[in-house]
Image (cartoon, grey):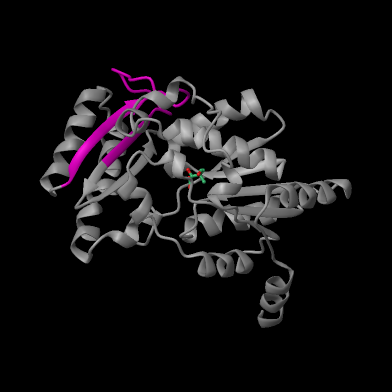
């Protein structure tokens, strides 16, 4: 194991420029090897590592990007507070068997500022998009730029950011049709809280209160299994459990899986999505209603 680690560390390459990234991917492709890509903003946790390990399993060559993308933050304080842990992240990528870490600067990604913006598809204007104006335009834009630098065959995303996966799928269909989008299940802590880079900012008390979110999702699933199909009844009950724990609810939404359009009567496969603030940390999570 130690020898394998030493080997992985020796072979991991860190690339900072788009030209070098493209050249690296093209030499991999010239050998007919497939490229799997895990885009991240760093502050890596077990959810990211699971994506990287899955990519390692599926593809011949794995690239992970670490870039805190300024254009997807609607608040400067949120951007400034975002944890930056590059050394630990590179080490974690190495352990997960990543071949290349692409860690560009903001100037490398946006040399002339943001001149041409991709506008996210309609699904990006509701929920997170309504609460954080411009967020999904920033995500769609940076993922398109990253795809053009890395030129992957497959890109891996976590289901925790369900709405993001729909925005990215639409963007890829229009701008990067050669890239397959693979959405992997949410990774949770032993207590059920979905892993997120923001969790480190929760106090011990707030972390306990945050458990109202996965519990709310469980409650919604149980209500559906027990026969409640009225979406309002489900979301009102979930909202109550969140506010009882002192969470400030942004939304509890039941939507169709393909575009998150609001449903009145739930069907198997619909998605329930929650966004709530615990102290000053905003968390999101979701679950599929299924029998
Ligand atoms: O999910 C994230 O971490 C980011 O939104 C992404 C996809 C890396 C784009 O910056």
Q: Quadrant of residue 53?
A: bottom right
From the viewer's perspective, is residue 254 above or below residue 145? above
From the viewer's perspective, is residue 71 above or below residue 59? above
162 vs 100, left or right, is: left
151 magenta-colored: no
Query: Magenta part of the protein: which range?
Result: 247-275
Where does the N terminus fall, quadrant-wise?
bottom right
The residue located at (13%, 42%) in the rendering is 243
Q: Quadrant of residue 110?
A: top right
Residue 152 visible somewhere in the drawing: no
Task: Specify the farthest residue to the front.
Answer: 112
The residue located at (47%, 42%) in the rendering is 159
269 magenta-colored: yes
How many marks overall? 0
The residue located at (88%, 47%) in the rendering is 30
Q: Nearer the viewer, residue 243 or 170?
A: 170
The residue located at (45%, 53%) in the rendering is 187
243 vs 120, left or right, is: left
Q: Position of residue 50 (x, y in %)?
A: 55, 56
Residue 30 visible somewhere in the drawing: yes
Where does the C terminus fall, quadrant-wise?
top left
162 vs 235, left or right, is: right
Q: Position of residue 251 (x, y in %)?
A: 25, 33
Q: Nearer the viewer, residue 50 or 6?
A: 6
Q: Quadrant of residue 136?
A: top left
Q: Position of residue 22 (x, y in %)?
A: 75, 46
From the viewer's perspective, is residue 20 above or below residue 87? above
Q: Nearer the viewer, residue 108 or 96?
A: 108
Q: Position of residue 18 (x, y in %)?
A: 69, 47
């Amino acid at each position: 194991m130690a020898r394998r680690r030493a080997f992985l560390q020796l072979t991991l390459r860190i690339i900072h420029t788009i030209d070098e990234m493209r050249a690296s991917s093209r030499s991999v492709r010239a050998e007919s090897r497939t490229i799997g890509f895990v885009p991240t903003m760093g502050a890596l946790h077990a959810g990211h590592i699971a994506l990287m390990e899955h990519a390692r399993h599926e593809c011949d060559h794995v690239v992970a990007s670490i870039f805190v993308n300024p254009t997807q933050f609607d608040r400067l304080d949120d951007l400034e507070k975002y944890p930056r842990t590059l050394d630990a992240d590179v080490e974690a990528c190495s352990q997960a068997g990543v071949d290349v870490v692409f860690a560009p600067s903001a100037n490398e990604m946006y040399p002339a500022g943001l001149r041409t913006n991709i506008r996210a598809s309609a699904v990006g204007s509701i929920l997170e998009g309504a609460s954080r104006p411009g967020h999904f335009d920033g995500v769609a834009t940076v993922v398109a730029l990253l795809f053009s630098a890395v030129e992957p065959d497959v890109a891996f995303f976590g289901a925790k950011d369900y709405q993001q996966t729909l925005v990215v799928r639409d963007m890829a269909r229009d701008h990067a049709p050669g890239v397959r989008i693979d959405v992997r299940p949410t990774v949770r802590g032993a207590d059920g809280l979905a892993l997120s880079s923001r969790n480190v900012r929760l106090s011990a008390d707030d972390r306990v209160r945050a458990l109202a979110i996965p519990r709310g999702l469980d409650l919604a699933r149980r209500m559906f299994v027990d026969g409640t199909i009225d979406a309002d009844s489900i979301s009102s009950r979930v909202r109550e459990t969140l506010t009882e724990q002192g969470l400030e609810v942004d939304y509890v939404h039941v939507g169709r899986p393909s575009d998150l359009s609001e449903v009145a009567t739930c069907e198997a496969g619909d998605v329930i999505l929650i966004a709530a603030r615990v102290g000053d940390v905003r968390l999101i999570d979701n679950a599929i209603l299924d029998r």
